[in-house]
Image: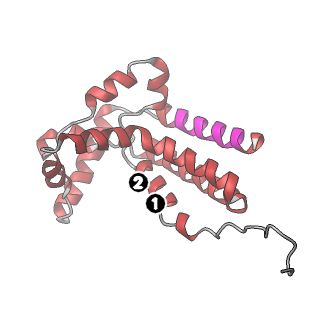
Amino acid sequence: MRGASWGSWSASMYLRAGRGLADSSRADAIHHGAQVIDFERNTHTLFEPALQKFFLPAQWTIEAANFLYLNAQFSVALGFLIWLYLFRNESYYFVRNMFVVAMCLALIGYVGFPTAPPRMFPGDGFIDTITQILLGESDSTIAKVFINPYAAVPSMHCAFALMIAPPAPRLPPLVRKPSGPSGRS
């Protein structure tokens, strides 16, 4: 497992560092974010501000969502890959490679279309519930390498969730070896 997990970890760190280094100008990111919001408004698919306002009175849901937003992408994906390596090893290498390809494609998106996240658009009805948490975590130099405030498109939170949730139940079942000699009663 050492070589497999070291390779996955180093590829992930390389791509995360690339994402942080792909930091673009604020003006481009704000412009692209506004384009996404305008597109959603024009296609009548801008539902996020209303959904957010629905959950705001229940502060625990906001705190849980913020915690998951900041922590689940890495921990769930890493936990899934470790589980896959240990218990479904025949599927591990394909899935690991799928994650690496997805991160490479995302890096192209971060560089080519830097996009500010919705929380940076209070005028469009979005309420920023996470800045204080991000400021606390992103003040260090090392955090600034791994956090790009203008890397909202593509959303790797959504991509990783879609790469894990639908296929996980479809993985082949564990094959258990019989405890005694086969064919004997």
**Residue 91 at x, y percent in the picture:** 68, 62
Disc 1: CA contacts within 10 A as few (<14), some (14-19) or many (>=20): few
- In front: 87, or 159? 87
Q: Is residue 163 above or below residue 21?
A: below
Q: Amino acid at mark 2?
A: Cys
- In front: 147, or 109? 147
Q: Which mark is residue 5?
A: none
- In front: 137, or 119? 137
Q: Is residue 42 left or right of residue 10?
A: left
Identify the secondary structure beneath mark 1: helix
Dots 1, 2 in contact, CB < 8 A: yes
* Farthest residue, direction top: 140
**Residue 163 at x, y percent in the picture:** 51, 59
- In front: 26, or 126? 126
Where on the picture, by quarter, is residue 122?
top left
The quarter of the picture where the C terminus appears is bottom right
Q: Which mark is residue 158?
A: 2
User: What residue range appears in magenta?
Assistant: 5-18
**Residue 118 at x, y percent in the picture:** 25, 44
Residue 65 part of the magenta segment: no
**Residue 95 at x, y percent in the picture:** 62, 58
Identify the secondary structure beneath mark 2: helix
* Farthest residue, direction front: 185
Disc 2: CA contacts within 10 A as few (<14), some (14-19) or many (>=20): few
Q: What whole-number distance in Å separates the C-alpha atoms at marks 1 and 2?
A: 6 Å
Q: Is residue 46 left or right of residue 112?
A: left
Q: Amino acid at mark 1?
A: Leu
- Who's the residue at 18% across and 40% down the image? 59
Which residue bears the numbered disc 1?
162
Where on the picture, by quarter, is residue 38?
bottom left
